[in-house]
Amino acid sequence: MNQNRNQILEPKMILELLNEIDVQDYFKLLKNGQDLSDFELKLNQNISKVDLSGLYIPDFDYKQLKQLKELNMSQNKIKELPGLHSKDLITLDISSNKLQNVNDLSKLTNLQNLNISKNEIIDVDELAKLNHLKTLNISGNKISDIENLQNLRNIQQLDASDNEFLNIDDFLKLGTLKQLNISKNKITSVEQLENLADLQQLNINNNQIVLINGLAKLINLQELFASGNKINNIIMLENLVNLRELDISENKILNIDILEKLTNLQQLNISRNQISTIEKLTKLKQLKQLDMSGNQIKSIAKLGELTNLLQLKMNKNQIYEIEQIQKLYKLQYIDLSENLITSIAKLRRNTICNLRRQGDPENLCYLNLSKNQISQISTQFGTENDLLFLNQLHLSGNGIDNIDFLKYYTDLEYLDVSYNKIKSIDKLAHLEKLQELNISNNEIDDINALYQLICLQKLDISGNQIRNIDNISNLVYLKKLDTHQNKLNTFNKLENLISLDFLDISGNGITNTDTLAKLVSITKLNISGNGIFNIDGLSNLINLEFSRYFQKFNIIIKRYLKYETTKISMCQQQLNQGYFCFREQQEPYQS
């Protein structure tokens, strides 16, 4: 490519690109939402692969591409595809456009992979001529009938999700299918689906299905997704012994005993049902991920036998005893939030983060115990167990008043101890790897310990008794700071927080905004509920997005009119009440 790649070309300039590498490299310079409607594209006829996705191109001359094999025109403004007749085209992605029909595609007889998802298509009959198709994505349209596609003898993958299908009749003759997605439709029955004997992956999520008897003979299934239906009986799944992943969440299932026969399962989601007993799951020795949140489970007495578990979600149940978890040595992720747990002493000597400790830095160590009934955690808890290698810890919504034990958890990168009864956070000074910290809604009045946490990027100290935040002035990587509902009168040293994008200082006693003048990176600012009468200090904040955060200000109205970046309008009927009403997508009010 001859042009300087850092040079932005003017509209109407002809872009002559030599090969597929130049095409992709050049358009990376121009993506980022730039509208190329006025550009005329002249491409080398020998190009075989072109990616013009996300460039807002409404039209394009395809005739110049004689040897094209792969074309991506997704996320543009295309309404039709005249001239796209390349016999060599194998892969075409025109998803997320404004197509209303597929008539222009009928001549692409060698197509093997076609994505027309997220358009405005109703009829796909013309695709019947594309008998070489192997993968077809028609999701996110308005299609209710594919009867004429039954001659697609090579089709292996079909995504027809998020359309208007009422039944599965049109799919039954596509006997070569290995993957079928018909989720997000209005299907009530899957009877006779056994005709698709080669299916390996089936997605029927979010329909209106009650009975799944039609799945009984799909013995080649490896992945089944059936969440968000009205299923109450799963006994017909007992023969699907090749299943590796099963999602039957958000149904009306009471009994899961039959699952003990599916011994090849590695991922199981039975969340949001009406399950109370899980004893039969102990035979699923290969399970790595188990989600049983949102049920009525009280006991997990035998869960310790699932020794290959890596991820366990049990939130929103009625669990009070968690002793068995200490046997699950490979666990990397546990969510026990919203249960009835009063003590975590039995987690001592548990190697929850064993894999990461052996040297794999990509394994997250996550423990969520929020919204339980834990009030006391001994300082010995930190010295006697292997939870020290946790990366993320959630303890919000308990009755905890002492967090001294946390001083040992020096690997923590995320900590949430909000909504407790904590008064002192002195021991947090040891957690120098913290990137996100939430200590909101406690009884804290001193945050000097945060001075050393220089890696912090998000900090929430709202809902406390804090009067001074000068000690966080060195947290130069901080992007989000929430201090609302404290007792602040000033914040004189915040000018060092040059990375700050979000700041909430509402509900304090602040009267002056001059200190904010240097925080030019801020895009979201909430200063409501203070005693501010003058906002001249905001004049430098050229990136500020005015929004609902500025309602009910007792200030002089005309001060707003000089901020050219605002999109605000005056609510005339409220003018006399002394505050603004902000509406998005409108021009600034003109006096």
Image (spheres, rainbow, N blue to C red):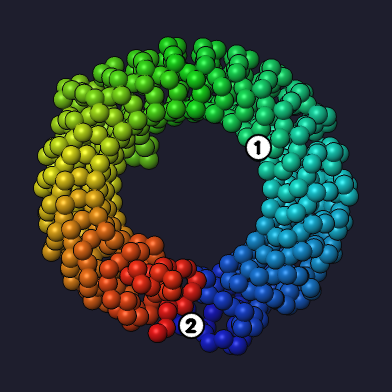
The correct choice, above or below, for 139 with respect to 367 in the image is below
- State how many labels appear: 2
Name the quadrant containing residue 564.
bottom left
Q: Nearer the viewer, residue 528 or 452?
A: 528
Are the two marked residues, 1 and 2, in contact with CB atoms closer than 8 angstroms?
Answer: no
Location of residue 53 (image quadrant): bottom right
- 533 vs 497, nearest the viewer: 533
Q: Is residue 137 visible?
A: no
Question: Which numbered mark, 1 or 2, is in the foreground of this view?
Answer: 1
- Residue picked out by circle 2: 8
Secondary structure under badge 1?
loop
Q: Amino acid at mark 1?
A: Asn
- Image x and y of residue 547, in percent: 39, 65
In the visual, does 108 lie left or right of 518?
Answer: right
Nearer-N-terminus badge (1/2): 2
Q: Is residue 255 above or below residue 467?
A: above
* x then y, percent, for residue 114: 73, 56
Q: Position of residue 384 (x, y in %)?
A: 20, 21
Q: Residue at x 69, y 62 (%)?
A: 94
Given residues 433 and 15, the one toward you in this image is 433
- Packing grade of label 2 (10 A; few <14, some 14-19, many >=20) is few
From what the image shows, is residue 503 above or below residue 7? above
Work out whether 38 lies above or below 145. Answer: below
Asked whether 445 or 213 is in front, the reply is: 445
Left or right: 469, with 434 as reference point? left
Q: Which residue is found at the position 35% from the left and 68% from the top? A: 577
- Per the rendering, the mark at residue 403 is none
Res. 205 mark: 1
Q: Residues within 10 Å of mark 1 (few under 14, many from 20)?
A: many
